[in-house]
């Protein structure tokens, strides 16, 4: 394989990197936002340019050949350099108009952000906001998003991180469901119910046991990665679920299970890349999020 003689096309390299990281053409196409046939043509074009087979099919997935493994490290380094260049270029922009991607959890995206985005767009109509609703962490350094609202503190030195406040959550259920199990009066009696949670019942049970709830993984017979879907099951009487105080108290279909119990508190952080934070658009959006979210919703200014 003559690397020096190869004609290089960055689109083909991106297709190769995405396929290598995702393990299949379909997953890589979704990650890049292009069709699978287009991605396949780009990978095939890179193989033709290099005169080498880069992938071999294994079942329904793909595996790198030795030649593909040799190429992967070089192109990853190039991809990281391209990302740093893009961040630096975006950081120099003095224009407010343009697109910005905000990532946060499903619940925050659906319930916390709408009034903030509406107010922001009323003040700056040129700003286009893309909401990336995802409970799993997104990589700001790879430009999967520009700003993240998270419940943990990012430790990467390239990020600007601002703690907004501590949020609070409670357990909720419908009145009918609480009657069906005999309304619990304390943490021990909560074990009479079933819970709706994430697909990690062992972790959830252990965390709640540390808070005095006598729960086991068997108490979580219904799980879903999407917190909004969990909430719908709670609202329709399938069991008990945890929700942020602002959302849960505003929902007329449910009640707090233990009204006088101390809330479960968790931090809320805002994170952005340092170079992006230097751009005017980034500063405007970042500052708007701080102003709107640094205080509990009942104290925040109305749109």
Image (cartoon, helix red, strand yellow):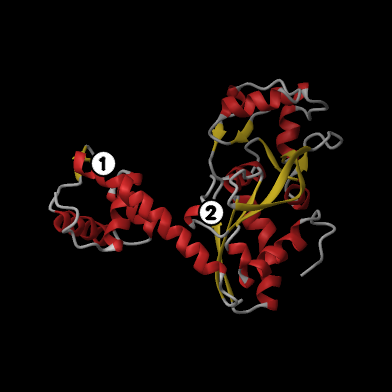
Pointer 2 residue: 140
Q: In this picture, is 180 found above or below 141?
A: above
Please tell me how crowded label 1 is: few (under 14), some (14-19), or many (20+) other residues with Cα within 10 Å: some
Mark count: 2
Distance, label 1 to label 2, CA atoms, is: 26 Å
Horizontal and vertical percent position of residue 229: 57, 46
Q: Which structural element holds mark 1?
A: helix
- Which of discs 1 and 2 lies nearer the camera? The answer is 1
Tell me which numbered mark, 1 or 2, is placed earlier along the sequence: 1
On the image, which quarter does residue 217 sit in? top right
Horizontal and vertical percent position of residue 9: 26, 63
Q: Which structural element holds mark 2?
A: helix
On the image, which quarter does residue 23 sit in? top left
Nearer the observer, 175 or 222: 222
Which residue is painted at 59% across and 79% down in the image?
126
Extreme front residue here?
4
Pointer 1 residue: 69
Answer yes or no: is residue 61 visible. Answer: no
């Amino acid at each position: 394989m003559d690397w020096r003689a190869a004609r290089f096309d960055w689109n083909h390299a991106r297709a190769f990197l995405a396929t290598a990281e995702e393990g299949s053409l379909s997953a890589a196409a979704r990650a890049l936002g292009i069709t699978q046939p287009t991605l396949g043509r780009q990978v095939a074009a890179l193989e033709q340019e290099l005169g080498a087979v880069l992938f071999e099919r294994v079942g329904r997935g793909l595996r790198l050949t030795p030649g593909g493994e040799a190429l992967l490290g070089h192109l990853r380094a190039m991809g990281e350099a391209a990302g740093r260049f893009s961040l630096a270029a975006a950081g120099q922009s003095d224009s407010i108009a343009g697109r910005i991607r905000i990532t946060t959890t499903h619940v925050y995206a659906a319930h916390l952000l709408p009034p903030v985005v509406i107010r922001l767009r009323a003040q700056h109509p040129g700003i286009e906001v893309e909401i990336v609703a995802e409970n799993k962490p997104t990589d700001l350094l790879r430009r999967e998003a520009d700003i993240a609202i998270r419940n943990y503190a990012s430790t990467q030195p390239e990020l600007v991180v601002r703690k907004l406040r501590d949020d609070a959550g409670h357990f909720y259920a419908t009145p009918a469901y609480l009657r069906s199990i005999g309304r619990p009066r304390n943490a021990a009696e909560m074990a009479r119910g079933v819970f709706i949670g994430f697909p990690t019942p062992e972790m959830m049970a252990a965390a709640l046991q540390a808070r005095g709830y006598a729960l086991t993984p068997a108490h979580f017979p219904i799980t879903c990665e999407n917190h909004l879907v969990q909430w719908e099951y709670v609202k329709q009487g399938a069991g008990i679920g945890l929700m942020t105080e602002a959302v849960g108290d505003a929902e007329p279909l449910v009640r707090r299970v233990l009204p006088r119990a101390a809330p479960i508190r968790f931090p809320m952080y805002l994170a952005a890349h340092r170079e992006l934070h230097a751009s005017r658009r980034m500063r405007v959006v970042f500052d708007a999020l701080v102003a709107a979210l640094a205080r509990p919703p009942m104290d925040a200014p109305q749109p």
